[in-house]
Every structure is written in C-alpha cells, then in structure tokens.
Amino acid sequence: MSDTTAVIGKNKPMNAHEMATAQLNRAAEVMGLDPEIHTILSQPKNELIVNFPVRMDDGRHVMFKGYRIQHNNIMGPYKGGIRYHHEVHLDEVKALAAWMTWKCAVMEIPFGGAKGGIKFDPRQYSPAELERITRRFTHALGNNIGPDHDIPAPDVGTNAQTMVWLMDTYMNFTPSDRKNAVRGVVTGKSLTSGGSQGREKATGQGLVFVVEEWAKENNFSLNGATFAVQGFGNVGSFAARILAKHGSKLVAVQDHTGAIRSVDGLDAVKLADWVKKNGGVAGFPGGDVINQTEFFSTQCDLFIPAALENQITAETAPLLKCRAVFEGANGPTDIDGDRILRERGIELLPDVLANAGGVTVSYFEWLQNRRAESWTLEEVDARLHTMMVHAYATVRRIARDRKIDNRTAAYVHALTRIETVYKERGIFP
Ligand code: GLU
C-alpha cells in the first residue's frame, strides 16, 4: 500500500493513459496490428464515474468520486482491482484498466480488463467510515459489476476486508435464492468469506516465480543475490519475504515514509511486521536512512518497483545499478525510463507478466467459487507456478524471435490473441 511519487527534479510525471497508449502503439507497429482493432483497443469500452455522499463518524456528509473503467471484455468478464488513493484520476484508471486486459491475455486467463477506484486517502478514515464508503460505492456501481460481468479485486489501498464488504453489499441486493451464486462478484476475499488459499501473497509469489525463471535462463544464483524494493505493501513485502527464503539479500527499501539501506541485508520478515505496526519503513532499526537518489543508486542485482506509476523515469533510470528490473507495480516505468534501461542493457520484466500472479490466483478463486470448491495452498501454488513459467517462456520466446524488448513481446503475445478473437467474431452488427 506504499505510495512514492517521484520527487527527484521538477519533471511532471507522465500521464498514465498516454504512457499506456504509447506502449500499445509500439507493439501495434512491431506486429502490424489491424488498424481498426488498434483503434478499438485505444479506448475503454465503458467509463463510469459516480459521485456519492457518505456519513462520517462526526455526522457530516462528505462527497466522494468513484470510477469503474471497463476496458475490454472480448476474452471474458471485465476483471481488475479497486484502488483507494488520493491521486486516483480518470486517466490513471483508464491506463490501469488497459493493463489488466493485456495482463489477462498474457496469462491466457479468460478475463478482460477493468479497474476502479475512489479518490481519497484511506489512511485518514476510520474503519467504520471505510466500510460505509465501500458499501455506498458498491451500491452506486449496482449492476455494472457481477460475477459474470465485471469482477473487482484489491489494489493499492484496499484489502480482503474491503472485498468482503463489497461482496456483502452486492449480495444484499441479490434475491435470496441467488445470494450464494454471486460470491464470485469479487476476488481477494478473506478465506472465511470465500477467498482462496495463496491469494494474499499471489502477486509477490508470481513475481518470484518470474525471478526464478529469469535466474535459470541467465545462469544466475539467487542464493546470495542482492535486491532493492520500492513500496513495502502487499506486493513488495511478499516478494521480499519469498526471495529471502532463496537466500537473497534485501539491501534497500523505500516507501512513502522514507528509505533505508543496509549492505548486510534487512530482515524482510521483521520489516513487514514493522510496516504493519508503524505504517511505513521509516524508523526500522538496522538500516541507514538514505535519500531517494541514494535509494535508486543502490548497487543490487534485482530492482523491484512495487509502489505506483512513474518511478523509473528519465531522471531515475540512469541511476539504477542493477542487472534486471521486475515490475511489481503497474506502470512503474515510463516511456523514457524504458528507453534508458534498454540502452543501458538492463533487462526489464514488465508488469503485465511480473505482477500477474495476483489476477491469476483471482481467477483460481473465481473458479473455486463457481464450483463450490476449496483448493489447498499446494495446489494453488503449483497451478500458479505452471502458468507463470508458461507465460514467461512465451514472452521470452517472442522477444528473442523478434529481437524486441520483453514489454513489447508481452504486448505482442496479448494483442495477437485478442486480434484473433476479434477477427473470428467480427464487429457487431
Ligand atoms: N490489482 C491487481 C492487479 O493489478 C489484481 C487484480 C485482480 O486480481 O483482479 O493485477
């Protein structure tokens, strides 16, 4: 849940929608995507904005602005998280929705792409207020979501509790005889309310599976390797704890509260407990306090941005001293950042592959809900592993065959599948 906006220099961060469009255009050109399908995919199918009042604990009513952007559903129901953050805006949610379409297609999951959010800082509100905000937002979304139509999940600022409130609210306006059939309206629920084993750690776990494949391909030993993580929320903290089990060493970490570094390595498990109690990495004993430039300049093997968009940019990409970047966040590298990493020969494993473990286990949760099943953690992890290994191999094969970067290769893989379906089905009427 960490947020870190680039504060180095004065450059305005790139608009996320423009960034997503530039990525799409690059891949479309490489593969010769049908121009009409390209145009269709350049905009979301539906953009829903709702304004709604919520009663605060002191009795006042405050207006909130919520979004649900449905980018594309040709491969299956719309799918994607709900973000609570004070910087949520239309163009950001549009970009995040498009990235979900590509991510699900890269993973060969039968889902489309969507994203939602509310523009507010959840840290400033009580649990009772968060519950009322979530329930009122769900009510405002009404039948625009549904287990066969559009399936939300957690994202920055939301968690399993948020999803359970959402599910319960949705169930409350579903006829009694259908209530249990709609449990899959959201994923990322608590285990007790119908969630899946392994969902909480899934994004971090999937990222580590990608790291493992990369290490194998490069004959690189993870035992003794060093890594830095930006953002120590769900994705960053699970990735760090799982990598630590491989004998890799966390040498630097940064979040919205500050940055710390230790050449001897930071204890990822203790740091995760610290962040839970204190709200951020600042003050964690055992590390030296560093600034943002020092954080980005830290010598390490693997760099894992797991916070927000626009972190690896024209200003920060030249600072990186790592072998490879694994994108735990969505859109952490802007267009200049991508180009600079390519020029510098730093390999990048893109968000739509590296952080796809979350939506993949969301798919498993949705399947379990439909079939009234409950899979073991071993089964979930094994299936996730198979799918991540397959997606990694496919993306790398395309990158090698076409001599293109991994992000463009992932897009080519996703767009080829989507284009095929458009051509098979045609455009109505
Ligand atoms: N918010 C996560 C993502 O960006 C998970 C989405 C999901 O599980 O639907 O991939």
Image (cartoon, rainbow, N blue to C red):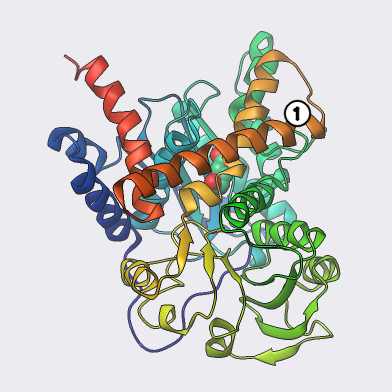
Looking at the picture, does residue 125 appear above or below residue 423?
Answer: below
Please give the name of the residue rendered at 57% of the width and 89% of the height, measured from the top-left corner: 294
- Three-letter amino acid code at the position of disc 1: Gly
Looking at the picture, does residue 330 appear above or below residue 359?
Answer: below
Q: Quadrant of the C terminus?
A: top left
Residue furthest to the top in view is 177
Residue 26 visible? The answer is yes
Observer-nearest residue: 357 or 214? 214
Q: Which residue is mark 1?
A: 194
Please give the name of the residue rendered at 62% of the width and 77% of the height, measured from the top-left corner: 300
Q: Residues within 10 Å of mark 1 (few under 14, many from 20)?
A: many
Residue furthest to the left in view is 35
Residue 364 location in percent, x, y? 65, 28
Observer-nearest residue: 43 or 299? 299
Residue 64 location in percent, x, y? 49, 55
Please give the name of the residue rendered at 60% of the width and 30% of the height, measured from the top-left corner: 363
Residue 242 location in percent, x, y? 76, 56
Observer-nearest residue: 181 or 285? 285
